[in-house]
Image (spheres, rainbow, N blue to C red):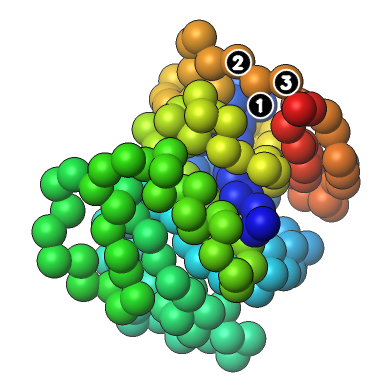
């Protein structure tokens, strides 16, 4: 079975919303990590808001390493009851039975599914115990307000699988459910 990997940028206080505060810490180490993470996945799973942001940003981009091409050519699954006529190539909309459809995606051959952003969708997936791995890039900044990865009432028992510090002070924490 393929893994559903939640890849998130977080502030020290757990905020994941509008991660513009990450830019002063971005460096080649983090870029290389995100490159490897993307290329080890075969699909993206996104909520509507994150999808619309990505769909507006990525189709016109190019780069020498092929990151943009990979973003644009990966299969994309967006969970939404309201999105009509998705324009980003390779997009399938999931409108109902979210847990069941995600289980089907995980069972298909082809590789891991990468989930980025998508705060509301993340809460559903955590509640349904569908996330197989959390790749958290924790930035040394306190934002003070915004959507948090683990919202009030959320419960998850996790075990640390990897921890690495980048030279900019960002810490990668990889967690897996302790089932």
From the viewer's perspective, is residue 167 above or below residue 133?
A: below
Instruction: Give me the disc on residue 166.
Output: none
Q: Is residue 153 left or right of residue 162?
A: left
Question: What's the distance in space between the residues labelled 1 and 2, CA to CA?
Answer: 18 Å
Quarter where residue 36 is shown: bottom right
For label 1, the crowd category at 10 Å Cα-Cα, with few meaning under 14, some 14 to 19 and many 20 or more, is some
Tell me the mark number nearer the camera, choosing from 3 and 1.
3
- The residue indicated by pointer 1 is 12
SS class of the residue under badge 1?
A: loop
> Which quarter of the image is occupied by the C terminus?
top right
Counting from the top left corner in percent of width and height, residue 135 is at 69, 45
Q: Is residue 88 left or right of residue 31?
A: left
Counting from the top left corner in percent of width and height, residue 37 is at 68, 64
For label 3, the crowd category at 10 Å Cα-Cα, with few meaning under 14, some 14 to 19 and many 20 or more, is few
* Residue under the image location 21 percent in, 72 percent down: 87
> Which quarter of the image is occupied by the N terminus?
bottom right
- The residue indicated by pointer 2 is 155
* Residue under the image location 43 percent in, 30 percent down: 124
- The residue indicated by pointer 3 is 157
Asked if the residue at tag 2 contacts the one at tag 3, i.e. Cβ–Cβ closer than 8 Å, the answer is yes
Counting from the top left corner in percent of width and height, residue 115 is at 52, 51
Residue 1 shows in the view: yes
SS class of the residue under badge 2?
A: loop
- Mark 1 vs mark 2: which is more N-terminal? 1
Q: Is residue 23 left or right of residue 29?
A: left
- Mark 3 vs mark 1: which is more N-terminal? 1
Residue 50 shows in the view: no
Counting from the top left corner in percent of width and height, residue 76 is at 40, 66
* Residue under the image location 24 percent in, 48 percent down: 95
């Amino acid at each position: 079975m393929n893994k559903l990997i939640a890849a998130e940028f977080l502030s020290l206080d757990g905020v994941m919303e509008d991660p513009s505060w990450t830019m002063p810490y971005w460096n080649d180490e983090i870029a290389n990590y995100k490159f490897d993470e993307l290329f080890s996945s075969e699909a993206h799973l996104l909520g509507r808001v994150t999808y619309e942001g990505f769909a507006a940003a990525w189709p016109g981009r190019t780069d020498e390493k092929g990151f943009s091409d990979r973003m644009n050519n990966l299969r994309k699954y967006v969970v939404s009851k309201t999105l009509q006529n998705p324009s980003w190539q390779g997009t399938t909309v999931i409108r109902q039975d979210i847990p069941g459809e995600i289980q089907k995606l995980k069972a298909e051959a082809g590789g891991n599914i990468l989930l980025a952003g998508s705060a509301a969708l993340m809460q559903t997936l955590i509640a349904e115990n569908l996330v197989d791995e959390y790749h958290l890039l924790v930035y040394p900044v306190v934002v003070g307000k915004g959507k948090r990865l683990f919202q009030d009432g959320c419960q998850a028992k996790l075990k640390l699988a990897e921890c690495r510090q980048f030279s900019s002070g960002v810490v990668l924490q990889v967690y897996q459910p302790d089932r």
